[in-house]
């Protein structure tokens, strides 16, 4: 029987990701002075951040967060984010303008089988690919709706537009980088 995993280390996580085929590098956050891992899947970079440290173990922790951050230009409606969260499990999407953050928690609390970590990596990979497809499908729909709304005359609207200092026009589609 395989040994049960009760703690994580950055080295063990790096090895797990590399075993599945990811390139992984170790970095240090200059502000928090903590190490973390960085990798990519489907052309989208992500970080593997250690979570709750185990008492008495400097390198061991019981959970980690896989997180990717996208920059949003323009307005992104919360219903698009909420719809994703309502139809997917495990990973969660959060809009904190101007960023769209997608993350998944990986926990070994109580002990897990070694293949559990690999399964979580596969879930993450699948969800990132689904997120990319979801955004590619939904953003053009949003642009079409915004374009139609901007082109339709509004009741009581005048032909002269007031001067404003908005970074995103009402009919402009949001872009995500």
Image (cartoon, rainbow, N blue to C red):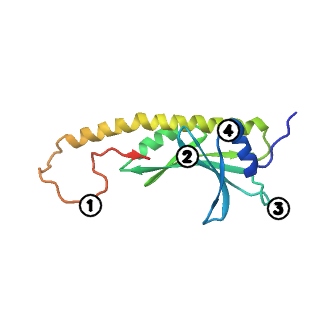
Q: Quadrant of the N terminus?
A: top right
Q: Earlier in the sequence, mark 3 or mark 4?
A: 3
Q: Secondary structure at mark 2?
A: strand
Q: Earlier in the sequence, mark 1 or mark 2?
A: 2
Instruction: Residue at 68% x, 50% y: name it.
Output: 64
Q: Which residue is mark 1?
A: 165
Q: Nearer the viewer, residue 146 or 42?
A: 42
Q: From the top left corner, tell me how far across and down residue 143 is, in percent.
A: 32, 39
Q: Earlier in the sequence, mark 4 or mark 1?
A: 4
Q: Which mark is nearer the camera, 2 or 4?
A: 2
Instruction: Residue at 19% x, 60% y: name it.
Output: 163
Q: Secondary structure at mark 1?
A: loop
Q: Secondary structure at mark 3?
A: loop
Decide: marks 1, 3 in contact (CB < 8 A)? Answer: no
Q: Which residue is mark 2?
A: 45
169 to the left or right of 84: left
Instruction: Residue at 26% x, 40% y: name it.
Output: 147
């Amino acid at each position: 029987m395989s040994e049960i995993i009760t703690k994580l280390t950055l080295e063990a996580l790096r090895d797990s990701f590399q075993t599945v085929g990811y390139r992984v590098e170790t970095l240090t956050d200059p502000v928090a002075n903590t190490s973390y891992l960085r990798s990519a899947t489907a052309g989208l970079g992500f970080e593997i951040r250690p979570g709750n440290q185990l008492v008495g173990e400097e390198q061991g922790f019981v959970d980690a967060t896989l997180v990717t951050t996208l920059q949003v230009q323009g307005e992104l409606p919360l219903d698009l984010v909420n719809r994703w969260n309502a139809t997917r499990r495990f990973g969660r999407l959060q809009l904190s303008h101007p960023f769209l953050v997608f993350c998944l928690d990986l926990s070994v609390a109580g002990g897990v089988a070694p293949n559990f970590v690999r399964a979580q990596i596969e879930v993450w990979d699948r969800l990132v690919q689904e997120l990319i497809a979801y955004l590619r499908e939904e953003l053009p729909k949003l642009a079409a709706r915004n374009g139609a709304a901007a082109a339709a005359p509004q009741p009581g609207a005048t032909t002269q537009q007031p001067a404003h200092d908005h970074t995103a026009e009402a009919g402009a589609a949001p872009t995500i980088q």
